[in-house]
Image (cartoon, rainbow, N blue to C red):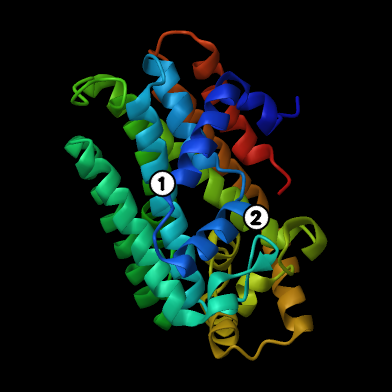
Amino acid sequence: MPYSLSEILFPVKQEAAEFNRRFKGTMLSTVPLVNLIAKYLVRTKGKQIRPMLVLLSSQACGEVGDASYRAAMLVELLHTATLVHDDVIDEADTRRGFASIRALWRNKAGVLMGDYLLAKGLLLTVESSEYHFLEITSTAVRRMSEGELYQLQKSRQLNIDEESYSKIIADKTASLIATCCEIGAASVSPKGENLEQRQMLRAYGEAVGIAFQIRDDLFDYEKTSAIIGKPVGNDLKDKKLTLPLIHSLSTLEPKEERRIRSLIKSGKASDGERRLIMNLVAATGGLSYARSKAEEYSESARKSIENLPDSPAKKSLIDFSHYVIEREK
């Protein structure tokens, strides 16, 4: 059955509206340029999956309250800050089909705006004395930074294997999703003392985050630019090795594997050569292998929350674990 994101998020539909109202207010500043950029960020926001996971996790463990909204705002501020900084690092001119902050206001404004958003999140937490939120989110920030640096190190030699890939996506992507789910659970307990629920939701978020990223990496081999917003084979063009290709390379003779790695590393592969590599990935089982791994992590996510009390929010979390691997964009 197809899983609809709007249906999955229905249990927190009213809470989502309240979150958006509060989130707009928390980004405001006395500096006009900050407000201008903040309004642009709000207008070009994505699906807001991460704060919605906070609210669903809160509801699955209790009731959504003020602390839950602050937790959701904290992770959304952190996530938005990382996206703004990523666009500066990657010299990206677009984000979700819109001009990026660095494209409109240049790199300096992009870096400073990212710093501002991070500071707002920290102040939001300190002012409410929810220091356990800081502990949870600081772990995510450390892991995301380490993941980016580890990927940079491995990419220079282009010697990423499946173990390296798994560590990179766990740190870069899954760590923040795990944080969303854990902090949601923690927000329903005054000091986050519901450790068993927190651990269940963290494990869920870690597994579903890995499944999410593997599915994302499959798009580069399956879809057209019009559907997913990026050209097919773009990862190859950027010299980025993901699970479908990593598995396919492991099936080749060493000489052929070295030749393909060298071709990708040179950055000189033609469109035709990239197409041949993509066909090779399909022919050697790279796509089916990556899909099966995504399904394994999706199932692991569901098992992690088996002992949560039954509720509409729990069902939505289960459905979301299916959605992340069946989505088409």
- From the viewer's perspective, tell me whether residue 191 is left or right of residue 150: left
| Quadrant of res 74 | top left
Residue 325's place in the image compared with 144, above or below, is: above
Name the foreground residue: 18 vs 232.
Answer: 18
Image location of residue 79, percent across then percent down: 44, 53
Residue 57's place in the image compared with 263, above or below, is: above
Name the foreground residue: 249 vs 89.
Answer: 89
- Where is mark 2, residue-wise? 218
Image location of residue 80, percent across then percent down: 46, 56
Residue 68's place in the image compared with 254, above or below, is: above
Q: Amino acid at mark 2?
A: Leu
Residue at position x 18%, y 25% in the image: 191
Disc sitting over residue 26 in the figure: 1
Name the foreground residue: 8 vs 205.
Answer: 8
Whether residue 12 appears in this view of the structure is yes
Residue at position x 55%, y 43% in the image: 48
Image location of residue 98, percent across then percent down: 68, 65
Image location of residue 57, percent across then percent down: 42, 25
- From the viewer's perspective, tell me whether residue 201 is left or right of residue 138: right
Mark nearer the N terminus (1 vs 2): 1
Element marked by disc 2: helix
